Structure formats: C-alpha cells, structure tokens
Image (cartoon, rainbow, N blue to C red):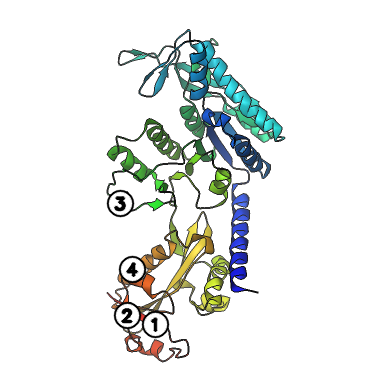
Amino acid sequence: MPANYRQLNNALASAIREVFSYISRFKGQLFILKIEDSLLEQPAFPVLIRDIAQLHNVGIKIVIVPGTRTSIDRQLNAYGLKSSFKNGIRLTSEEALPLVEQASLGAAQRVLSHLTANGINGIQGNWVQARSLGIADGTDYMRTGKIERIERGIIEKLLQEGFIPILPPIGWNKLGHAYNISSTELATELCRYLPVGKLFFIGEESGIKTEGLIRGKLTKKLELSDHGLISAVDIDQATEILKTNHQLPFAQREYLENSIRACRNGVKRVHLLCGITQGNILQEVFSSRGNGTMVYANEYWNLRPAAIDDIPDMLRIMQTYVERKLLISRSQEDIEAKLGDYVVYAVDNAIHGCGALHAFEKNSYEVAAIAVGTNYKDAGIGEAVVNFLIEKAKKQKAKKLFLLTTQASDWFYTLGFKDGTVNDLPKSKREKYNQNRNSKVMVMGM
C-alpha cells in the first residue's frame, strides 16, 4: 500500500472516529440556533436546514430562533414606514407593530416550511411573555419589549415529543398585547430556562476578525483559523476584546456580549458561524476546529496527565510517526510502564496530541513521544505539548533537557532547543543510543 494512500486512509479513519465520538457526546443535548433571516434568500439556506435536520436525526435536540431584522425592514419599507434605532434596538411604533408581527411570524413560517421539506416536525408558538421597555434616558421604546418569562414546560414537552420548536421574537403581556423583542436576546435568554449544550449565532459573517483588532494582555496570542478569524476565546478574552475594541461592529459586539451572558448562564460553547458556506454547522459540531468563532466558559485547551484509557488513542496518533520513522515504536506495555511521564492534549475529551517527559540521572530530562493527530498538525498542539513539558521540567528543577529527533530539528529550534552531541546525553541514555538510527541530539539548558 503506497505511503500517501495510507496517510489519506489514516486521516479519513481519524475523521470518522471523531464524528462518531461527537455524535455519542451530543446525543440528547439541546442546541439553540439563532438564524439570521438575511440567510433566507441565500441559495445555501436549504442546505443549512438540511444539515440542521441531520443534527436532529442523530438525536440532538434543536430550538430555532429566527432573526427578523431584514424581514421587518423589507415589510416596513413596502408600506413607506421607517424605523429608528437606539443603541441597536429598534423603536417599534403602534403603527409599525402589526407589520413587525407579520414579518417575524413570516420568517418563522419559512424556517418551518424548510424543516417540513426535510421530514422534520417543527412548530411555532407564543411561549414568550414580555413587557414594555418603557422610557429610558428620555427615549420611548413604544412597542419594543423585554423578555419577562419563557414557557419552559411547553418547550421541553415539545422537545421530548421530537418537535423542533421555533420561537419568533415576539412576546405578549398578560393582556395579550404584543411586543417586538430582540431575537439575539431571546436566544440567549433561553439558556437561562433550558439546559443548553451549545448556542449558535448563525449569520452572513463567520466570526470575529483579527484585522484591526487591538490586543490586550489576555489576547496577545489567540487561536486563529486559516481565514484570519479568531477560532476560539474564553469569556475573559472576549471581555477584554469588548473593552479594548470600541470600533467593533454592533452585531459582533452584541454577539460577544450575549455569548458571555450565555456562558455565565451555564452554556459550555457559543459559536458565531457563517450560514452561507455549506457544511459549516456540521464541521463546527463534529470537529474541534470549526470555521467560526467559539466563545467558551470551560477550558478548551486541555493538557492533562495521560490515563490508561487514553493509550489506544495515543498509539493511534503515534502510528503515523512510526510509519514515517519519526518515532520509535512503542507498545501498550511500554506506555503503561511509564504512564506517569505522559501527557495528552484533549479537546472535548478526544485525544489529539501527546508527549512524555522521562527523568534520567543528574537531573536530566528527555522530551519524547511528541505526536499530533493528522487533522490537527497546524493547530499549535505540538508546540503546546512541548512547552508544557518544558515548564514541567523546570518545576522538577531540571538542569538539562534533551531530545532525539530525525527530521524535526528545524521545528525544535523554534522552541528553544539547540544542537547537541551524543556526549550531552546522560550515561544511561548514551549507552542505549541507536547508532543505526543516528538521531540528532538537541539540548536546552535550564
């Protein structure tokens, strides 16, 4: 079997394993999807709904909140009415309210129609109680409202019965008077009432761009996508971005603010995602490297000590390196014997990288078994593992750090290692040095 074919086959198998892992993890969880209505006219919108239907079919519970700004603007323009905004909030007049209701319910109905076309039972209803925003700082918000309560019980029952509830951003007070409410606020507020696993804000933009972004102490180094987007930030980093970047577009600022709120309400992941590119939502759900910006409350990068259950995945990741003669072969017994030396890089409990720090005489330590999953070689995982092991060695009061490599010396140079010789190895390691393999010795003074 040609080497290229084996590598391609290994990468495909790894991707399939990852998908199955995520399906198992997310089955039964609830995802809230806020979908901008500007996507309704996009050719890719039916594909987006089809992908959402597939999520539903593998056992993920879905609630959809349609955005309505584009639909409302179009409806008001058709009747010669204009809206004013205050801090991004539409001021809804008595005259405009019936048209706002019509536009909002119409957007929800179009989503429902597409779900039906995919064999999914969707349902929309008046499950949001609201009150008037009133007058604030001299501004009369008229028939624009604020969420007061959501009928949690009804939504949960519909989810149990296999429906996808659709909540248009219209709320009613106890007298039956309607109010226009924010769809972004509604999607976020649902996270207070329901046990939400993920919240998605799906629109025409992919996420937060780094171009022109002012970096602070927490955001000097960010995980970036191939398209210059911030791939992931925790809520502290997101807060810093908001404080140091007052020029952020309103939509991005609103999404970041609501992402932080949602995470503090118990949501683990909030995703800002483009709905135009086909397959984006599936990639965002079923891989740890999506195409949008993710805001998270719990630790995303997770370097931890290896456990017995991790060994099969560690061997799988190492195998590609062994086949290319970049690593020596190790058995399960070999790893078990020195399990305490190994660390793994886990994303959502899926292992994507590993490494080891072996102790030798005279406070010398070896960095070894550095391997990263085929699909994640450009994600900075290898660098994170090595840097973690360097810090671990420092804590152990190491005097010298060394490693053996056949083809990765240029990469290790960037991490602070320098050329060494066999004489730099501790005696016990030097005596077992494989002359036939002729590995390059690299060292780092501590």
Q: Residue furthest right?
A: 119
**Which residue is identified by label 1?**
440
In three-dimensional space, the C-alpha distance between marks 4 and 1, rounded to whole angstroms, equals 16 Å
Vertical position of residue 370 compared to residue 89: above or below = below
Residue 194 appearing in the image? no
In three-dimensional space, the C-alpha distance between marks 3 and 2, rounded to whole angstroms, equals 30 Å
Amino acid type assigned to the residue bearing label 3 in the image = Lys
Disc on the earlier residue, 2 or 1: 2
Say which element carries label 2: strand
Disc on the earlier residue, 4 or 1: 4
Question: Cβ–Cβ below 8 Å for labels 2 and 1?
Answer: yes
Disc on the earlier residue, 3 or 1: 3
**Which residue is identified by label 4?**
414
Query: For residue 66, what is the image quadrant?
Result: top right
Residue at 68% from the left image edge and 42% from the top image edge: 57
Question: Cβ–Cβ below 8 Å for labels 4 and 2?
Answer: no
Residue 300 appearing in the image? yes
Disc on the earlier residue, 4 or 2: 4
The numbered dot on residue 220 is 3
**Which residue is identified by label 2?**
419
Within 10 Å of disc 1 (Cα), the crowding (few <14, some 14-19, many 20+) is: some
